[in-house]
Image (cartoon, rainbow, N blue to C red):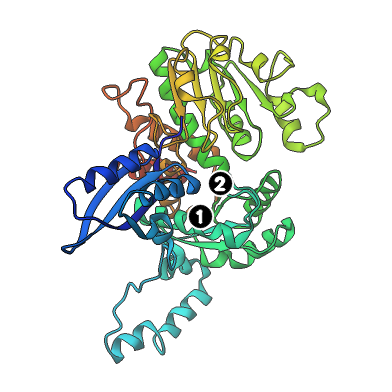
Amino acid sequence: MPVPGPGYSITIRVDAPPSAGVAGDLTSAVGRAGGVITAFDVVDSHTDSVVIDITCNALSADHARDITDAVGALDGVHVRKVSDRTFLVHLGGKIEISAKVALRNRDDLSRAYTPGVARICQAIADNPEDARRLTIKRNTVAVVTDGSAVLGLGNIGPAAALPVMEGKAALFKKFAGVDAWPVCLDTQDTEEIIRTVELIACVYGGINLEDIAAPRCFEIERRLREKLDIPVFHDDQHGTAIVVVAALRNALRVVGKSMAEAKIVVCGVGAAGSAIIRLLLQRSPADIIAVDVDGIVHGGRGDTDANLRWVASNTNRDGRTGRLHDALVGADVFIGVSAPNLFGAEQVATMADKAIVFALANPDPEIDPLEAQKHAAVVATGRSDYPNQINNVLAFPGVFRGLLDAQAHSITDAMLLAAADAIADVVDGDKLNPSFIVPSVFDAAVAPAVAEAVRKVAGSQ
Protein backbone atom coordinates (compact mmCIF):
# COMPACT_ATOMS: atom_id res chain seq x y z
CA MET A 1 0.00 0.00 0.00
CA PRO A 2 2.60 2.69 0.88
CA VAL A 3 4.24 4.44 -2.05
CA PRO A 4 7.49 6.41 -2.08
CA GLY A 5 6.85 10.01 -1.10
CA PRO A 6 8.61 13.35 -0.63
CA GLY A 7 8.97 12.80 3.12
CA TYR A 8 11.89 10.49 2.26
CA SER A 9 13.32 12.37 -0.71
CA ILE A 10 17.05 12.11 -1.31
CA THR A 11 19.52 13.48 -3.81
CA ILE A 12 22.37 11.12 -4.70
CA ARG A 13 25.43 12.76 -6.28
CA VAL A 14 27.50 10.29 -8.29
CA ASP A 15 30.59 10.18 -10.50
CA ALA A 16 29.73 8.05 -13.53
CA PRO A 17 31.31 7.03 -16.84
CA PRO A 18 30.47 9.39 -19.76
CA SER A 19 28.79 6.62 -21.73
CA ALA A 20 25.62 6.92 -23.78
CA GLY A 21 23.84 4.39 -21.58
CA VAL A 22 24.74 5.78 -18.16
CA ALA A 23 21.43 7.60 -17.69
CA GLY A 24 19.48 4.44 -18.41
CA ASP A 25 21.67 2.39 -16.07
CA LEU A 26 21.21 4.83 -13.21
CA THR A 27 17.46 5.22 -13.61
CA SER A 28 17.00 1.46 -13.96
CA ALA A 29 18.97 0.85 -10.76
CA VAL A 30 16.75 3.28 -8.84
CA GLY A 31 13.62 1.70 -10.35
CA ARG A 32 14.69 -1.84 -9.46
CA ALA A 33 15.23 -0.72 -5.87
CA GLY A 34 11.70 0.71 -5.75
CA GLY A 35 12.58 4.41 -5.84
CA VAL A 36 10.67 7.06 -7.78
CA ILE A 37 12.90 9.53 -9.64
CA THR A 38 11.75 13.16 -9.51
CA ALA A 39 14.83 14.84 -11.03
CA PHE A 40 17.95 13.85 -12.99
CA ASP A 41 20.61 16.55 -13.46
CA VAL A 42 24.09 16.55 -14.97
CA VAL A 43 25.94 19.06 -12.78
CA ASP A 44 29.45 18.68 -14.24
CA SER A 45 31.11 16.96 -17.17
CA HIS A 46 34.66 15.88 -18.02
CA THR A 47 36.18 13.77 -20.77
CA ASP A 48 36.46 10.77 -18.47
CA SER A 49 33.43 11.21 -16.18
CA VAL A 50 30.18 13.04 -15.47
CA VAL A 51 28.78 14.23 -12.16
CA ILE A 52 25.05 13.52 -11.84
CA ASP A 53 22.46 14.36 -9.20
CA ILE A 54 19.62 11.84 -8.98
CA THR A 55 16.70 12.98 -6.85
CA CYS A 56 14.17 10.35 -5.86
CA ASN A 57 11.47 9.51 -3.35
CA ALA A 58 11.77 6.53 -1.03
CA LEU A 59 9.56 4.71 1.47
CA SER A 60 11.80 5.06 4.51
CA ALA A 61 15.34 5.83 5.62
CA ASP A 62 16.26 2.15 5.16
CA HIS A 63 14.75 2.17 1.67
CA ALA A 64 16.78 5.28 0.81
CA ARG A 65 19.94 3.40 1.78
CA ASP A 66 18.88 0.45 -0.39
CA ILE A 67 18.43 2.78 -3.38
CA THR A 68 21.84 4.36 -2.75
CA ASP A 69 23.48 0.93 -2.52
CA ALA A 70 21.85 -0.12 -5.80
CA VAL A 71 23.22 2.95 -7.57
CA GLY A 72 26.66 2.55 -6.04
CA ALA A 73 26.84 -1.10 -7.15
CA LEU A 74 26.89 -0.14 -10.85
CA ASP A 75 30.22 -0.57 -12.65
CA GLY A 76 32.21 2.65 -12.72
CA VAL A 77 29.75 4.57 -10.54
CA HIS A 78 30.96 6.22 -7.33
CA VAL A 79 28.51 7.78 -4.86
CA ARG A 80 29.97 11.07 -3.66
CA LYS A 81 27.30 12.01 -1.13
CA VAL A 82 23.62 11.61 -0.32
CA SER A 83 21.53 14.56 0.78
CA ASP A 84 18.29 14.01 2.69
CA ARG A 85 16.07 16.77 1.34
CA THR A 86 13.78 16.73 4.38
CA PHE A 87 16.71 17.40 6.71
CA LEU A 88 17.90 20.17 4.39
CA VAL A 89 14.51 21.90 4.73
CA HIS A 90 14.91 21.93 8.51
CA LEU A 91 18.47 23.25 8.72
CA GLY A 92 18.39 26.28 11.01
CA GLY A 93 14.64 25.92 11.51
CA LYS A 94 11.69 26.75 9.26
CA ILE A 95 10.50 30.10 10.64
CA GLU A 96 11.98 33.47 11.57
CA ILE A 97 11.00 36.86 12.99
CA SER A 98 11.09 39.89 10.73
CA ALA A 99 10.45 43.55 11.52
CA LYS A 100 7.28 45.17 10.15
CA VAL A 101 8.68 48.69 10.47
CA ALA A 102 11.76 50.27 8.91
CA LEU A 103 14.65 51.23 11.19
CA ARG A 104 16.58 53.42 8.77
CA ASN A 105 17.60 56.35 10.93
CA ARG A 106 17.48 57.99 14.34
CA ASP A 107 13.88 59.20 13.86
CA ASP A 108 12.66 55.67 13.10
CA LEU A 109 14.47 54.38 16.17
CA SER A 110 12.96 57.07 18.36
CA ARG A 111 9.43 56.11 17.37
CA ALA A 112 9.82 52.31 17.32
CA TYR A 113 11.95 52.20 20.46
CA THR A 114 13.03 54.74 23.04
CA PRO A 115 11.86 57.36 23.81
CA GLY A 116 8.64 57.09 21.76
CA VAL A 117 7.77 53.54 22.81
CA ALA A 118 7.27 54.73 26.39
CA ARG A 119 4.05 56.47 25.32
CA ILE A 120 2.71 53.19 23.95
CA CYS A 121 3.64 51.36 27.15
CA GLN A 122 1.79 53.97 29.22
CA ALA A 123 -1.28 53.74 26.99
CA ILE A 124 -1.44 49.99 27.57
CA ALA A 125 -0.85 50.43 31.31
CA ASP A 126 -3.82 52.82 31.37
CA ASN A 127 -5.99 50.54 29.21
CA PRO A 128 -4.73 46.92 29.04
CA GLU A 129 -7.19 46.11 26.23
CA ASP A 130 -5.07 48.36 23.98
CA ALA A 131 -2.49 45.56 23.86
CA ARG A 132 -4.67 43.92 21.19
CA ARG A 133 -4.47 47.09 19.11
CA LEU A 134 -0.89 48.24 19.68
CA THR A 135 1.18 45.03 19.94
CA ILE A 136 1.71 41.68 18.26
CA LYS A 137 -1.05 40.26 20.48
CA ARG A 138 -3.48 41.33 17.75
CA ASN A 139 -2.23 38.66 15.33
CA THR A 140 -0.18 36.18 17.35
CA VAL A 141 -0.88 32.64 18.54
CA ALA A 142 1.19 30.44 20.87
CA VAL A 143 1.60 26.85 19.68
CA VAL A 144 2.00 25.08 23.01
CA THR A 145 3.16 21.50 23.56
CA ASP A 146 4.79 19.30 26.15
CA GLY A 147 5.96 16.80 23.51
CA SER A 148 3.97 13.94 25.02
CA ALA A 149 1.98 12.85 21.94
CA VAL A 150 3.87 13.99 18.85
CA LEU A 151 2.44 12.77 15.53
CA GLY A 152 2.75 8.99 15.60
CA LEU A 153 5.99 9.16 17.58
CA GLY A 154 4.52 9.33 21.08
CA ASN A 155 6.21 10.91 24.08
CA ILE A 156 9.46 12.24 22.59
CA GLY A 157 9.71 15.43 24.64
CA PRO A 158 9.61 19.16 23.92
CA ALA A 159 12.89 19.58 22.02
CA ALA A 160 12.06 16.77 19.60
CA ALA A 161 8.57 18.25 19.18
CA LEU A 162 9.96 21.62 18.08
CA PRO A 163 10.18 20.80 14.32
CA VAL A 164 6.46 19.96 14.35
CA MET A 165 5.58 23.18 16.16
CA GLU A 166 7.72 25.17 13.72
CA GLY A 167 5.83 23.55 10.88
CA LYS A 168 2.54 24.45 12.52
CA ALA A 169 3.64 28.06 12.81
CA ALA A 170 4.64 28.11 9.15
CA LEU A 171 1.19 26.79 8.18
CA PHE A 172 -0.53 29.48 10.24
CA LYS A 173 1.39 32.13 8.32
CA LYS A 174 1.04 30.52 4.89
CA PHE A 175 -2.69 29.88 4.95
CA ALA A 176 -4.08 32.65 7.18
CA GLY A 177 -1.40 35.30 7.74
CA VAL A 178 -1.34 34.49 11.46
CA ASP A 179 1.94 34.95 13.34
CA ALA A 180 2.42 31.85 15.48
CA TRP A 181 5.33 30.83 17.66
CA PRO A 182 6.35 27.47 19.16
CA VAL A 183 6.20 27.25 22.95
CA CYS A 184 7.65 23.85 23.87
CA LEU A 185 7.45 23.29 27.63
CA ASP A 186 9.94 21.06 29.42
CA THR A 187 7.36 19.64 31.80
CA GLN A 188 4.50 17.18 31.62
CA ASP A 189 2.99 18.24 34.91
CA THR A 190 -0.56 19.44 34.36
CA GLU A 191 -0.39 22.23 36.92
CA GLU A 192 2.96 23.51 35.64
CA ILE A 193 1.69 23.60 32.06
CA ILE A 194 -1.46 25.47 33.04
CA ARG A 195 0.42 28.00 35.16
CA THR A 196 3.12 28.56 32.51
CA VAL A 197 0.60 29.23 29.76
CA GLU A 198 -1.33 31.49 32.10
CA LEU A 199 1.84 33.52 32.74
CA ILE A 200 2.72 34.04 29.06
CA ALA A 201 -0.81 34.51 27.72
CA CYS A 202 -0.66 38.33 27.82
CA VAL A 203 1.54 38.23 24.68
CA TYR A 204 -0.90 36.22 22.55
CA GLY A 205 -4.34 36.57 20.99
CA GLY A 206 -4.94 32.82 21.17
CA ILE A 207 -3.48 29.54 22.43
CA ASN A 208 -3.18 26.49 20.16
CA LEU A 209 -2.50 23.40 22.26
CA GLU A 210 -0.70 20.72 20.27
CA ASP A 211 0.43 17.13 20.75
CA ILE A 212 -0.42 16.87 24.47
CA ALA A 213 -1.42 13.36 25.48
CA ALA A 214 -4.89 12.41 26.68
CA PRO A 215 -6.35 12.54 29.26
CA ARG A 216 -4.07 15.36 30.47
CA CYS A 217 -4.99 17.49 27.45
CA PHE A 218 -8.67 17.61 28.48
CA GLU A 219 -7.90 19.06 31.91
CA ILE A 220 -5.35 21.52 30.53
CA GLU A 221 -7.73 22.87 27.92
CA ARG A 222 -10.69 23.09 30.31
CA ARG A 223 -8.75 24.93 32.99
CA LEU A 224 -7.07 27.34 30.57
CA ARG A 225 -10.42 28.20 29.03
CA GLU A 226 -11.67 29.09 32.50
CA LYS A 227 -8.61 31.19 33.38
CA LEU A 228 -7.76 33.08 30.17
CA ASP A 229 -9.55 35.84 28.28
CA ILE A 230 -8.31 34.56 24.91
CA PRO A 231 -9.45 31.51 22.90
CA VAL A 232 -7.83 28.16 23.77
CA PHE A 233 -8.02 25.54 21.03
CA HIS A 234 -6.59 22.01 21.16
CA ASP A 235 -6.04 21.26 17.49
CA ASP A 236 -5.65 17.51 17.92
CA GLN A 237 -9.18 17.52 19.31
CA HIS A 238 -11.14 20.28 17.66
CA GLY A 239 -9.25 20.76 14.40
CA THR A 240 -9.71 17.08 13.62
CA ALA A 241 -13.35 17.16 14.70
CA ILE A 242 -14.14 20.16 12.50
CA VAL A 243 -12.75 18.55 9.35
CA VAL A 244 -14.36 15.17 10.10
CA VAL A 245 -17.77 16.78 10.56
CA ALA A 246 -17.30 18.74 7.31
CA ALA A 247 -16.23 15.64 5.40
CA LEU A 248 -19.03 13.54 6.83
CA ARG A 249 -21.66 16.13 5.89
CA ASN A 250 -20.53 15.92 2.28
CA ALA A 251 -20.04 12.14 2.29
CA LEU A 252 -23.63 11.68 3.49
CA ARG A 253 -24.76 13.91 0.63
CA VAL A 254 -22.90 11.67 -1.81
CA VAL A 255 -24.60 8.49 -0.56
CA GLY A 256 -28.02 10.11 -0.09
CA LYS A 257 -28.29 9.64 3.67
CA SER A 258 -29.08 12.10 6.46
CA MET A 259 -27.20 12.59 9.69
CA ALA A 260 -30.37 11.73 11.58
CA GLU A 261 -30.34 8.19 10.16
CA ALA A 262 -26.57 7.62 10.35
CA LYS A 263 -25.22 5.00 12.73
CA ILE A 264 -21.59 5.94 13.32
CA VAL A 265 -18.68 3.92 14.74
CA VAL A 266 -15.80 5.98 16.16
CA CYS A 267 -12.68 3.91 16.79
CA GLY A 268 -10.26 5.60 19.18
CA VAL A 269 -11.49 7.54 22.19
CA GLY A 270 -8.45 9.70 22.91
CA ALA A 271 -8.19 13.41 22.20
CA ALA A 272 -9.34 13.32 18.57
CA GLY A 273 -11.97 10.60 18.95
CA SER A 274 -13.59 12.21 21.97
CA ALA A 275 -13.78 15.61 20.27
CA ILE A 276 -15.25 14.05 17.13
CA ILE A 277 -17.93 12.37 19.22
CA ARG A 278 -18.74 15.58 21.12
CA LEU A 279 -19.06 17.65 17.94
CA LEU A 280 -21.02 14.99 16.04
CA LEU A 281 -23.52 14.80 18.89
CA GLN A 282 -24.35 18.45 18.15
CA ARG A 283 -25.63 17.24 14.77
CA SER A 284 -27.89 14.53 16.30
CA PRO A 285 -26.90 11.32 14.47
CA ALA A 286 -29.01 8.19 14.92
CA ASP A 287 -26.34 6.71 17.19
CA ILE A 288 -22.62 6.68 17.86
CA ILE A 289 -20.75 3.57 18.98
CA ALA A 290 -17.34 4.32 20.48
CA VAL A 291 -14.63 1.65 20.43
CA ASP A 292 -11.22 1.59 22.12
CA VAL A 293 -8.60 -1.08 22.81
CA ASP A 294 -10.97 -2.72 25.30
CA GLY A 295 -13.83 -2.92 22.83
CA ILE A 296 -17.15 -1.11 22.60
CA VAL A 297 -17.53 1.60 25.22
CA HIS A 298 -20.64 1.09 27.38
CA GLY A 299 -21.79 1.97 30.86
CA GLY A 300 -21.22 -1.51 32.26
CA ARG A 301 -17.47 -1.62 31.65
CA GLY A 302 -16.60 0.11 34.89
CA ASP A 303 -14.24 2.64 33.30
CA THR A 304 -12.60 4.97 35.80
CA ASP A 305 -11.48 7.54 33.23
CA ALA A 306 -13.81 10.56 33.32
CA ASN A 307 -13.71 11.00 29.55
CA LEU A 308 -14.70 7.37 28.92
CA ARG A 309 -17.51 7.64 31.45
CA TRP A 310 -18.85 10.70 29.62
CA VAL A 311 -18.61 8.90 26.28
CA ALA A 312 -20.42 5.86 27.70
CA SER A 313 -23.27 7.98 29.02
CA ASN A 314 -23.75 9.90 25.74
CA THR A 315 -23.38 7.14 23.11
CA ASN A 316 -24.38 3.53 22.43
CA ARG A 317 -28.11 3.90 23.03
CA ASP A 318 -28.76 0.16 22.87
CA GLY A 319 -25.91 -0.78 25.22
CA ARG A 320 -24.10 -2.88 22.65
CA THR A 321 -21.01 -4.84 23.70
CA GLY A 322 -18.21 -6.63 21.89
CA ARG A 323 -15.24 -5.66 19.74
CA LEU A 324 -14.72 -3.41 16.73
CA HIS A 325 -15.91 -6.06 14.26
CA ASP A 326 -19.17 -6.34 16.19
CA ALA A 327 -19.65 -2.58 16.18
CA LEU A 328 -19.23 -2.39 12.40
CA VAL A 329 -22.20 -4.68 11.66
CA GLY A 330 -24.96 -2.50 10.22
CA ALA A 331 -23.05 0.76 10.70
CA ASP A 332 -23.38 3.52 8.11
CA VAL A 333 -20.11 5.24 8.98
CA PHE A 334 -16.71 4.25 10.36
CA ILE A 335 -14.40 6.97 11.69
CA GLY A 336 -10.99 5.75 12.84
CA VAL A 337 -8.44 7.77 14.79
CA SER A 338 -6.69 4.84 16.35
CA ALA A 339 -4.21 2.28 15.01
CA PRO A 340 -3.27 0.61 11.71
CA ASN A 341 -4.70 -2.51 10.11
CA LEU A 342 -7.62 -3.23 12.45
CA PHE A 343 -10.01 -4.74 9.92
CA GLY A 344 -10.43 -5.69 6.28
CA ALA A 345 -12.84 -5.70 3.37
CA GLU A 346 -14.85 -8.56 4.87
CA GLN A 347 -15.79 -6.36 7.84
CA VAL A 348 -16.73 -3.43 5.57
CA ALA A 349 -19.08 -5.84 3.83
CA THR A 350 -21.01 -6.24 7.10
CA MET A 351 -21.69 -2.50 7.26
CA ALA A 352 -24.85 -0.91 5.87
CA ASP A 353 -25.31 -0.34 2.15
CA LYS A 354 -23.39 2.67 0.79
CA ALA A 355 -21.07 2.65 3.77
CA ILE A 356 -18.65 5.50 4.54
CA VAL A 357 -15.15 4.72 5.84
CA PHE A 358 -12.85 7.40 7.29
CA ALA A 359 -9.64 5.52 8.18
CA LEU A 360 -7.53 8.37 9.58
CA ALA A 361 -4.69 6.69 11.47
CA ASN A 362 -1.38 7.98 10.11
CA PRO A 363 0.76 6.94 8.36
CA ASP A 364 -0.97 3.55 8.15
CA PRO A 365 -4.79 3.63 8.34
CA GLU A 366 -7.10 1.24 10.13
CA ILE A 367 -7.82 -0.45 6.79
CA ASP A 368 -6.07 -0.37 3.45
CA PRO A 369 -8.08 2.18 1.44
CA LEU A 370 -8.08 -0.11 -1.59
CA GLU A 371 -9.61 -2.86 0.55
CA ALA A 372 -12.21 -0.47 1.96
CA GLN A 373 -13.21 0.61 -1.55
CA LYS A 374 -14.32 -2.92 -2.37
CA HIS A 375 -17.51 -2.36 -0.38
CA ALA A 376 -17.60 1.26 0.86
CA ALA A 377 -19.13 4.03 -1.24
CA VAL A 378 -16.86 6.77 0.15
CA VAL A 379 -13.38 6.30 1.64
CA ALA A 380 -11.20 8.97 3.25
CA THR A 381 -7.81 8.86 4.97
CA GLY A 382 -5.37 11.23 6.65
CA ARG A 383 -2.83 10.65 3.88
CA SER A 384 -1.98 12.97 1.01
CA ASP A 385 -1.48 10.16 -1.51
CA TYR A 386 -5.14 9.08 -1.55
CA PRO A 387 -8.33 11.01 -2.38
CA ASN A 388 -10.26 12.73 0.41
CA GLN A 389 -7.46 13.69 2.75
CA ILE A 390 -8.91 14.78 6.10
CA ASN A 391 -6.28 17.25 7.30
CA ASN A 392 -6.40 19.73 10.19
CA VAL A 393 -4.79 22.35 7.94
CA LEU A 394 -8.26 22.86 6.48
CA ALA A 395 -9.44 24.13 9.87
CA PHE A 396 -7.00 25.71 12.29
CA PRO A 397 -5.57 28.60 10.18
CA GLY A 398 -9.01 29.93 9.29
CA VAL A 399 -10.39 29.31 12.77
CA PHE A 400 -7.70 31.44 14.39
CA ARG A 401 -7.91 34.06 11.64
CA GLY A 402 -11.58 34.48 12.47
CA LEU A 403 -10.99 34.48 16.24
CA LEU A 404 -8.24 37.10 15.99
CA ASP A 405 -10.23 39.30 13.63
CA ALA A 406 -13.19 39.21 16.01
CA GLN A 407 -10.89 39.80 19.01
CA ALA A 408 -12.70 36.85 20.55
CA HIS A 409 -12.20 35.96 24.20
CA SER A 410 -13.34 32.33 23.88
CA ILE A 411 -14.30 29.62 21.40
CA THR A 412 -17.61 27.77 21.30
CA ASP A 413 -19.12 24.70 19.68
CA ALA A 414 -21.17 27.04 17.47
CA MET A 415 -17.91 28.41 16.03
CA LEU A 416 -16.56 24.90 15.45
CA LEU A 417 -19.72 23.85 13.62
CA ALA A 418 -19.68 27.05 11.55
CA ALA A 419 -16.09 26.26 10.55
CA ALA A 420 -17.11 22.71 9.55
CA ASP A 421 -19.97 24.01 7.41
CA ALA A 422 -17.69 26.55 5.74
CA ILE A 423 -15.21 23.82 4.77
CA ALA A 424 -18.00 21.59 3.46
CA ASP A 425 -19.54 24.43 1.46
CA VAL A 426 -16.31 25.03 -0.47
CA VAL A 427 -17.09 21.76 -2.25
CA ASP A 428 -20.25 22.75 -4.09
CA GLY A 429 -22.69 20.42 -5.80
CA ASP A 430 -20.88 20.50 -9.13
CA LYS A 431 -17.61 19.32 -7.56
CA LEU A 432 -18.94 16.81 -5.03
CA ASN A 433 -18.32 13.13 -5.75
CA PRO A 434 -17.09 10.03 -3.86
CA SER A 435 -13.45 11.01 -4.43
CA PHE A 436 -13.89 14.70 -3.58
CA ILE A 437 -15.73 15.40 -0.33
CA VAL A 438 -13.31 17.97 1.14
CA PRO A 439 -11.32 20.70 -0.59
CA SER A 440 -7.58 20.61 -1.08
CA VAL A 441 -5.50 22.11 1.71
CA PHE A 442 -4.09 24.41 -0.97
CA ASP A 443 -7.51 25.73 -1.99
CA ALA A 444 -7.20 29.46 -1.37
CA ALA A 445 -10.93 29.76 -0.67
CA VAL A 446 -10.88 27.60 2.47
CA ALA A 447 -9.17 29.72 5.14
CA PRO A 448 -11.06 32.95 4.28
CA ALA A 449 -14.38 31.07 4.29
CA VAL A 450 -13.64 29.47 7.66
CA ALA A 451 -12.42 32.78 9.10
CA GLU A 452 -15.54 34.62 7.98
CA ALA A 453 -17.83 31.94 9.40
CA VAL A 454 -16.05 31.96 12.77
CA ARG A 455 -15.91 35.76 12.87
CA LYS A 456 -19.66 36.03 12.28
CA VAL A 457 -20.51 33.63 15.09
CA ALA A 458 -18.02 35.29 17.44
CA GLY A 459 -19.48 38.70 16.66
CA SER A 460 -23.02 37.53 17.42
CA GLN A 461 -22.22 36.09 20.85
Q: Residue furthest bottom?
A: 106
Question: How many other residues sit within 10 Å of disc 2, few (<14), some (14-19) or many (≥20)?
Answer: some
Q: How many marks?
A: 2
Residue labelled with disc 2: 151
Residue 76 lies, with reference to residue 290, above or below; the image says below
Numbered circle sitting on residue 440: none
* Residue visible at 50% across and 66% down in the picture: 129
Q: CA distance from mark 1 to mark 2?
A: 8 Å
- Secondary structure at badge 1 equals helix
The image position of residue 108, as x and y in percent, is: 30, 85
Q: From the viewer's perspective, is 234 left or right of 44?
A: right
Q: Nearer the viewer, residue 369 or 214?
A: 369
- Residue 164, disc: 1
Rendered residue at 71%/13% (across/down): 318
Report helix, strand or loop for mark 2. loop
Left or right of residue 279, residue 3 in this image: left
